[in-house]
C-alpha cells in the first residue's frame, strides 16, 4: 500500500474506504412500449421486450424493482403517455433506483429534443437510461455527445417517415370504394350520430392476417321506439328550424337517447356535430385531414373530400339551412358590448359578474347538483387560470341581484328617499377617501352581497 493510500485510509477510516471501493448495486425499472400491431409481429411485443430486459438484468447483476409498459406512440402529446409519466415518477420517488432499462431508446421517446432532455434530467437525478440494443454512450466525452444526438435523431426521423407513409395510406384509403357496397373506406374514429361502423374482411395479408376495412352505414338500432338514424335526422331538422344547442340537448336527454361518450348529452357535443365539416359528412361526403395535431382546423384546401362516400342523412339544402341558422345565432349579442347570448339562461353572464382574482367572466355551469356561476378562465389565461374553483349558486345570486335592483328602483322613484340614501352614503364614507363615480354606482347599494361570493383562490 502506498503512502498516499495509507494516509487516505487513516483519514477516512477503514470502513468508509472499503465502502467507497465496493461495486455499486444497480436497481432498475423495466420499461416496455409498443405502438402498432406490426411491432408485435416483428418480435417487439411488450412481453418479449420485458423478457429480454429480464435476461439482460440477470446477466449483468441488475435488480429489477418495478416494471411498466404502455401501448402508445412515443411521438405524441406527453399528456397522453400516462404510464410513461407514472414510470418516471416512480423512478424519481425511489431513492434506490439508479437505472431504467429499455429495449432500445426508441421505446423511451422518439422526439429527439424531448428524449435528450429527459435523459439529461434523469442523469442529473442519478438515474441512467440503459438500452439493450443501442451502443453504450458516454455523454461526458465528445464522441458520446455526437452519438447520443445521432441516436435520438435517427429515432425521430424513423417516426416521421412512418407518419408520412401512414398519412399517405390514409389519404388513399378514404378515397377507395368497396367493390361490393360502393361506399368509401374509413380511417377509423367514432361515426357521427346516426351512423354506425361496419367491419368488412377484404382478403388476407402475406402473413395470413385478414385485411379488415370499415364503412359507415345508417344506424338502425331502435332506441325509444325509433331507429337512431331517425332521431339524428329529426335533431338536424330541428337545428335547421332554429333550435338552440340547449333545446337539442334537452330533446336527446328527454327521449333517453344514449350520449356519444357519456350518459347524457351536452351542448358541447351538439356544437361539435353542427360544425361545417360534420354537416358535410351528414350530406354523404367523406372528409379527412380536417384537424392539425394540436386540434386546430386546417385550411379547406388541405381537406380530402369524397362525394357519396356513405349514405346521406340530410340534403345539401338542409345542411346549408343549419349553417345559416348557426351563423345568425353566433351574431345574436346584446348591444351593450357584452358577449352574452340573448338565449343564455344565466342572467349575469357576459361580463356582468367577474372573478375578483383574475377578472375573467363568471360563466354558467350545470352539474348534477344544480346550476352555478364559475370562473370561466382557462389554464394560464392572464397568468392565473383560476378555473371553476368556486361554485356560486345561480338562483341565489340572481335572486339577490334582482331584489337589489328592485330596491334601487324603489329608491329612485322617491326623490326624498334618493336624497336620504345619498346622504347616508356620504356620511358613511366621510372618514375614508372615496371617489364619486364609485359612490353612485348602482351596485353600491348591494355590494356587501357581492363580497360574499367573490371567487377567491
Image: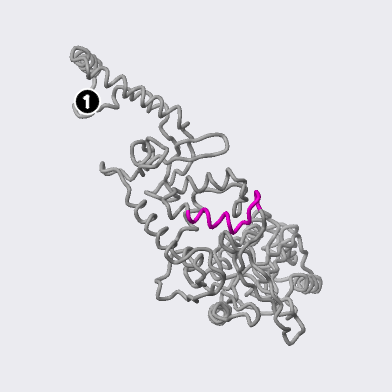
Q: Is residue 389 above or below residue 433?
A: below
- The image shows residue 224 at horizontal and vertical percentages of 65, 48
Q: Which colour scheme is used?
A: one colour
Q: Quadrant of residue 404?
A: top left
Q: In which quarter of the image is residue 335?
A: top left
**Highlighted range, magenta:** 223-237
Residue at image x 71%, y 77%?
201
Foreground pick, 368 / 76: 368
Residue 150 visible, this angle: no
Question: Position of 371 compared to 413: left or right?
Answer: right
Residue at image x 70%, y 60%?
97
Examine the residues drawn in magenta and state their main secondary structure.
helix
Residue at image x 47%, y 69%?
290
Residue 414 visible, this angle: yes
Query: Is residue 231 shown in magenta?
Result: yes
- The image shows residue 24 at horizontal and vertical percentages of 73, 65
Residue denoted by label 1: 440
Mark 1 surroundings: few (<14), some (14-19) or many (≥20) residues within 10 A: few
Badge 1 marks a residue whose secondary structure is loop
Amino acid at each position: 500500500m502506498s503512502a498516499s493510500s495509507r494516509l487516505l485510509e487513516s483519514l477516512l477510516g477503514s470502513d468508509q474506504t472499503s465502502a467507497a471501493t465496493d461495486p455499486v448495486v444497480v436497481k432498475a425499472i423495466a420499461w416496455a412500449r409498443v405502438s402498432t400491431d406490426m411491432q408485435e409481429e416483428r418480435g417487439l411485443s411488450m412481453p418479449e421486450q420485458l423478457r429480454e430486459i429480464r435476461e439482460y438484468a440477470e446477466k449483468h447483476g441488475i435488480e429489477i424493482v418495478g416494471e411498466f409498459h404502455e401501448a402508445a406512440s412515443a411521438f405524441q402529446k406527453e399528456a397522453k403517455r400516462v404510464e410513461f409519466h407514472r414510470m418516471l415518477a416512480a423512478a424519481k420517488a425511489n431513492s434506490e433506483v439508479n437505472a431504467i432499462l429499455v429495449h432500445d431508446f426508441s421505446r423511451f421517446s422518439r422526439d429527439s429534443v424531448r428524449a435528450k432532455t429527459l435523459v439529461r434530467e434523469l442523469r442529473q437525478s442519478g438515474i441512467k437510461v440503459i438500452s439493450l440494443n443501442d451502443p453504450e454512450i458516454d455523454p461526458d466525452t465528445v464522441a458520446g455527445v455526437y452519438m447520443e444526438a445521432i441516436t435520438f435523431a435517427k429515432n425521430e426521423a424513423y417516426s416521421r417517415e412512418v407518419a408520412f407513409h401512414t398519412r399517405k395510406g390514409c389519404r388513399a384509403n378514404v378515397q377507395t370504394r368497396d367493390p361490393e357496397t360502393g361506399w368509401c373506406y374509413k380511417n377509423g374514429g367514432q361515426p357521427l350520430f346516426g351512423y354506425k361502423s361496419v367491419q368488412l374482411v377484404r382478403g388476407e395479408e402475406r402473413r395470413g392476417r385478414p385485411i379488415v376495412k370499415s364503412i359507415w352505414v345508417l344506424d338502425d338500432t331502435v332506441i325509444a321506439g325509433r331507429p337512431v338514424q331517425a332521431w339524428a335526422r329529426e335533431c338536424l331538422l330541428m337545428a335547421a328550424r332554429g333550435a338552440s344547442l340547449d333545446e337539442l340537448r334537452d330533446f336527446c336527454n328527454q327521449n333517453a337517447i344514449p350520449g356519444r361518450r357519456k350518459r347524457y348529452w351536452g351542448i358541447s357535443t351538439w356544437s361539435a356535430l353542427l360544425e361545417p365539416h360534420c354537416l358535410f359528412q351528414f350530406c354523404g361526403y367523406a372528409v379527412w385531414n380536417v384537424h392539425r395535431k394540436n386540434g386546430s382546423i386546417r385550411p379547406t384546401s388541405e381537406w380530402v373530400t369524397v362525394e357519396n362516400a356513405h349514405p346521406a342523412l340530410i340534403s345539401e339544402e338542409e345542411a346549408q339551412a343549419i349553417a345559416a341558422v348557426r351563423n345568425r345565432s353566433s351574431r345574436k349579442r346584446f348591444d351593450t358590448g357584452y358577449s352574452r347570448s340573448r338565449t343564455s339562461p344565466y342572467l349575469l353572464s357576459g361580463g356582468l359578474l367577474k372573478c375578483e382574482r383574475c377578472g375573467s367572466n363568471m360563466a354558467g355551469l350545470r352539474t348534477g347538483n344544480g346550476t352555478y356561476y364559475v370562473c370561466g378562465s382557462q389554464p394560464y389565461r392572464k397568468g392565473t387560470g383560476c378555473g371553476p374553483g368556486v361554485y356560486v349558486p345561480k338562483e341565489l345570486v340572481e335572486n339577490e341581484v334582482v331584489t337589489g335592483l328592485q330596491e334601487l328602483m324603489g329608491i329612485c322613484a322617491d326623490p326624498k328617499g334618493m336624497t336620504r340614501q345619498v346622504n347616508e352614503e356620504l356620511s358613511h364614507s366621510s372618514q375614508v377617501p372615496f371617489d364619486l363615480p364609485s359612490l353612485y354606482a348602482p351596485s353600491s347599494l348591494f355590494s356587501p352581497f357581492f363580497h360574499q361570493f367573490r371567487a377567491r383562490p
